Amino acid sequence: MKPNTFIANQAAEKLGLGKDVLDALAKVAGRPAVANALLKIGQLMGEDKFVANPAPGGTGAMTKDQAQSRINELMLDSDFAKRLDAGDTRATQEWNGLHRLLVA
């Protein structure tokens, strides 16, 4: 799954839009328009912040390999582990975003 598709799917899920609603919207506006709208919503919701490409000069969302690499890096970071265990919002969002990207 492409990163932008992942972000759009997360937006649809968080908005509670089921397949039937998405199909109805696609019939009226067309699939590309619905996909672009959901991508924009996902970006505005901040979904893309937690799947952004961390590589120097990297643009767009990260790949699954990059997500796995970041997870491996975070697993060795004791400060991150403490923040995650303490319920830090940013740490939790990054951790969950990386894992969602892996299973997308």
Image (cartoon, grey):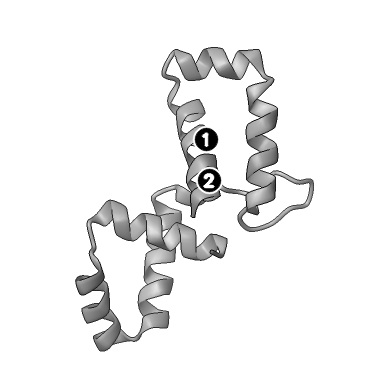
Q: Position of residue 71 (x, y in %)?
A: 63, 34
Residue shown at 44%/64% (left/top)?
39
Image quadrant of residue 23?
bottom left
Q: Residue furthest front?
A: 103
Residue on which the image places disc 2: 49
Q: Quadrant of the N terminus?
A: bottom right
Above or below 66: residue 33:
below
> In the rendered structure, which disc, 2 or 1, sits on the residue that comes first in sequence?
2
Above or below 61: residue 24:
below
Residue density around tag 1, few if under 14, some if 14–19, many if 20 or more, within 10 Å: many
Q: Position of residue 63 (x, y in %)?
A: 65, 54
Residue 53 in sight from this viewpoint: no
Q: Residue furthest right?
A: 56
Above or below 28: residue 57:
above
Q: Spatial distance from mark 2 to mark 1, Cα to Cα?
A: 8 Å
Q: Which circle marks residue 94 in the picture?
A: 1
Residue shown at 34%/86% (left/top)?
30
**Amino acid type of the residue that numbered disc 1 sits on in the rendered structure:** Glu
Q: Secondary structure at mark 2?
A: helix
Q: Secondary structure at mark 1?
A: helix
Q: Position of residue 97 (x, y in %)?
A: 49, 42
Residue shown at 22%/56% (left/top)?
16
Image quadrant of residue 25?
bottom left
Q: Position of residue 22 (x, y in %)?
A: 27, 73
